[in-house]
């Protein structure tokens, strides 16, 4: 049953804390299964990939064409798109590219007052692996959101892995791969695909960073393989928090809440409002819209099990609640969203005003839609070009610089009981 909370209730703090701490992510049995899959792929490579693809996707990897989707096939899919859909993908790609190009960091190179030259250079990783879901739904938007920042960062080799259940692939995803300029597409999914990207096999060469959303098994595989490769984040079920006053259209807010509920039965949609009658209207609108949704089964399960409506005395209470939830998406459907945003410290992405539904951010706005979930917005950010880059610092001393800062380095080395460190400085001072 959808949670109903009121900040004036005596037990509100307890009930809200339960809502915040409710676990919606994978349990230990998933971790055990993923560990076994990773071990098998590391030990047996392509042989294990073949077995898992047949078992989980019903896809036989026998011929070379069973393994890869060619650039020619992606171009054909692009050419076959309806013009309106092709233009929509191109618009999304151009806006994503422009937004992420502005994120590129600058190198630094300067000499300080002590005569010490220092700075840092940014370089892209050599290869990035991008996971594109192909099970419950196929998301060309996710391919664009992962591949374009990687290409903007300067990654030379972009490798996509995507499950193809019964051998079927989504032509819109292939068209998006053509637009983004992906180098390789492997018809492999699940934890075994993540393992292949991390460890490499005879066919699939390893990468340096793995990004992209997936199911609980994919997320767990990324978590366990962090350190072997870099990852963007461990993504959990989708979330949306809508903070709305009574001057909104209830149907709009209901649609916004269901936009995340339809992702997965474990997704979470929460409304905070200062008007109880408006909350009731939104709840009624959700029931009406659920009846007509093609994704009704998933959205209904999510809303009934994990959804929540919170009525507060004043919307001034909302930012503190939002900061505790640290949601993936936060909509501020109020007259003055800037005032509320100033007090929201933890959110994956914020959508300002009544005319800015979260779904715009999923597709064409420009900022990345790969965002921290499960309260990780307290310490993590959305995917950016920096996830595909690393910074290397450098230092250069001459005699002047060594004379200025060397004695202090030697003293600190002695204080730490590291005489060889100290000597490597002192011999230059002499």
Image: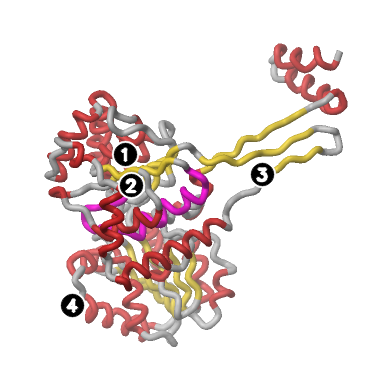
Q: Nearer the viewer, residue 303 or 228?
A: 228
Q: Alpha carbon of mark 1 to alpha carbon of mark 4: how far?
A: 37 Å
In the rendered image, residue 197, in percent from the top left (x then y), is placed at 34, 36
Q: Earlier in the sequence, mark 3 or mark 4?
A: 3
- Mark 3 is surrounded, within 10 Å at the Cα level, by few (under 14), some (14 to 19) or many (20 or more) other residues, namely few
In the rendered image, residue 158, in percent from the top left (x then y), is placed at 40, 44
Q: Earlier in the sequence, mark 2 or mark 1?
A: 2
Q: Alpha carbon of mark 3 to alpha carbon of mark 4: how far?
A: 54 Å
* Residue labelled with disc 4: 291
Left or right, 202 with respect to 151, comes to: left
- Residue at (78%, 19%) from the top-left corner? 410
Q: Nearer the viewer, mark 1 or mark 3?
A: 3
- Mark 1 is surrounded, within 10 Å at the Cα level, by few (under 14), some (14 to 19) or many (20 or more) other residues, namely many
Left or right, 146 with respect to 138, comes to: right
* Residue labelled with disc 2: 131
- Residue at (23%, 30%) from the top-left corner? 46
Q: Alpha carbon of mark 1 to alpha carbon of mark 3: how far?
A: 32 Å
- Residue at (81%, 23%) from the top-left corner? 406
Q: Is residue 212 magenta?
A: no
Q: Earlier in the sequence, mark 2 or mark 3?
A: 3
Q: Is residue 232 above or below residue 413?
A: below
Instruction: Work out which quarter of the rendered image holds the N terminus and state it.
Output: bottom left
- Mark 4 is surrounded, within 10 Å at the Cα level, by few (under 14), some (14 to 19) or many (20 or more) other residues, namely few
* Residue labelled with disc 3: 107
The answer to whether any part of residue 8 appears in the image is no
In the rendered image, residue 99, in percent from the top left (x then y), is placed at 53, 61
Q: Alpha carbon of mark 4 to alpha carbon of mark 2: how far?
A: 33 Å
Q: Earlier in the sequence, mark 1 or mark 4?
A: 1
Secondary structure type for disc 2: strand
């Amino acid at each position: 049953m959808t949670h109903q909370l009121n900040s004036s209730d005596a037990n509100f703090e307890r009930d809200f804390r339960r809502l915040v701490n409710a676990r919606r992510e994978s349990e230990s049995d998933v971790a055990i299964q993923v560990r076994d899959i990773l071990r098998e792929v590391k030990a047996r490579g392509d042989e294990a990939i073949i077995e898992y693809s047949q078992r989980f996707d019903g896809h036989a990897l026998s011929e070379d064409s069973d393994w890869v989707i060619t650039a020619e096939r992606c171009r054909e899919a692009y050419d076959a798109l309806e013009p309106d859909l092709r233009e929509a993908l191109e618009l999304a790609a151009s806006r994503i590219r422009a937004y992420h190009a502005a994120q590129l960091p600058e190198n630094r190179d300067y000499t300080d007052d002590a005569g010490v030259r220092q700075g840092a250079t940014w370089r892209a990783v050599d290869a990035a692996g991008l996971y594109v879901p192909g099970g419950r739904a196929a998301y060309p938007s996710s391919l664009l959101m992962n591949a374009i920042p990687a290409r903007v960062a300067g990654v030379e080799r972009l490798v996509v892995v995507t499950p193809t259940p019964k051998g079927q692939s989504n032509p819109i995803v292939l068209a998006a791969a053509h637009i983004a300029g992906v180098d390789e597409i492997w018809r492999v999914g699940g934890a075994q695909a993540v393992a292949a990207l991390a460890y490499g096999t005879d066919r699939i060469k390893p990468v340096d960073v793995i990004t992209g959303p997936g199911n609980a098994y994919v997320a767990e595989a990324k978590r366990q393989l962090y350190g072997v490769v870099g990852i963007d984040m461990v993504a959990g079920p989708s979330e949306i928090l809508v903070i709305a006053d009574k001057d909104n259209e209830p149907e709009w807010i209901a649609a916004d809440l269901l936009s995340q509920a339809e992702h997965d039965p474990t997704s979470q949609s929460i409304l905070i409002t200062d008007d109880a009658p408006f909350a009731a209207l939104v709840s009624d609108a959700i029931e009406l819209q659920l009846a007509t949704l093609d994704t009704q089964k998933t959205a209904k399960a999510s809303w009934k099990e994990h959804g929540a409506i919170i009525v507060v005395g004043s919307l001034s209470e909302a930012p503190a609640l939002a900061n505790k939830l640290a949601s993936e998406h936060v909509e501020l459907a109020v007259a003055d969203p800037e005032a509320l945003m100033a007090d929201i410290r933890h959110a994956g992405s914020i959508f300002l005003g009544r005319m800015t539904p979260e779904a715009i951010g999923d597709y064409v706005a420009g900022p990345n839609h790969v965002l921290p979930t499960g309260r990780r917005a307290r310490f993590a950010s959305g995917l950016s070009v920096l996830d595909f880059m690393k910074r290397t610092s450098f230092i250069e001393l001459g005699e002047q610089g060594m004379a200025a800062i060397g004695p202090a380095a030697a003293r600190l080395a002695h204080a730490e009981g590291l005489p060889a460190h100290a000597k490597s400085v002192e011999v230059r001072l002499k």
